[in-house]
Image: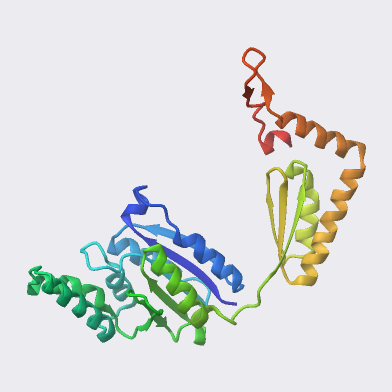
Amino acid sequence: MLEASMIVVGDEILGGYVTDENSPLLARVLRDHGVGLSCVHVVADDLAAIDEALSLELSRARPRVVVTSGGVGSTPDDLTFEAVAASLGRDLVTDPTIGAKVDGALAWSAEQGFPVSEEFAWHVLRMARIPEGSRLVERSGGWAPGVLVDVEGGVDAGGVTVAILPGVPSEFAALLTEAVAPQVLAGRNPTPYVAELTHRYPESVLNLAFVEVMERYPDVKLGSYPGRPAIVRLSGVRSEVEAAAAHIAAVLSELDASDAGQRLAAARAAREAPATDTRSGAATPADAATEEEEA
């Protein structure tokens, strides 16, 4: 089964100046293709930091796709191409397709009267220097390309494919959905069946039922999320998910029909209802009980 990891590169994210939008999108796209996301690293614009994260992901179970986001521009802090090449023991080579786009941009700048020196051009052309043996993935109408680097034959041969994508969310999203997903993700894993149940109880009330489900159906992923209502999410092979969901639904039905369950649900609802400040008539927070306290 294909698995995935992500490395988000950017001092601006670690510094709290920018919110990462790319990892949530990747998680959703992977989920739609039945591919699990093992972890997300957020690292600085630093060669050693990128290398450390990539080296760890290369050591994980295969086949695997490692998606990077950011650090592929022309400024001195854009180091992802260089870091990936060094981590894989490869040289950087100038890609003619990206190089032609950069040359066009430099020519346009010169036409506007901007002094395009040899040193200036060299720095801008950094974004065209990619790890040797890479292949481009492009989208219609886009400027920034993505780069795929296969390790030990890539995912097709049971190895690793590193997908190096821009950090700009619109560019990342377009390349991920239009190029990387169909080329690297599509058709490799079965799409899991998902079932959700909602209920009005503290989630800990269902702990014993959860244990039974996990023991009977070890391949079914179970998640419990407190809220109003609380949600139980199950995913996996349809027949097993349906059986697991039926078991939990039966437990909930028993709770709903019991005096204890009705009292518990009523008490929980009352405990969470907003209290009223009799002096001002304003609503004030009720006793802030957590799910753990309710248990």
Q: Horizontal and vertical percent for residue 47?
A: 28, 64
Which residue is most to the top?
A: 279
Q: Horizontal and vertical percent for residue 27?
A: 54, 64
285 with respect to 74 (left or right): right
The quadrant the C terminus occupies is top right
Q: Horizontal and vertical percent for residue 89?
A: 30, 78
Which residue is found at the position 67% from the left and 14% from the top?
Answer: 278
In this view, the residue in front, 64 or 67, is 67
Which residue is found at the position 79% from the left and 59% from the top?
Answer: 213
Q: Is residue 62 above or below residue 206?
A: below
- Quarter of the figure with residue 102: bottom left
Q: Is residue 204 above or below residue 82?
A: above
Q: Horizontal and vertical percent for residue 109?
A: 15, 71
The quadrant the N terminus occupies is bottom right
258 with respect to 130 (left or right): right
Q: Is residue 165 above or below residue 259?
A: below
Q: Is residue 55 above or below residue 283?
A: below
Which residue is found at the position 19% from the left and 79% from the top?
Answer: 103
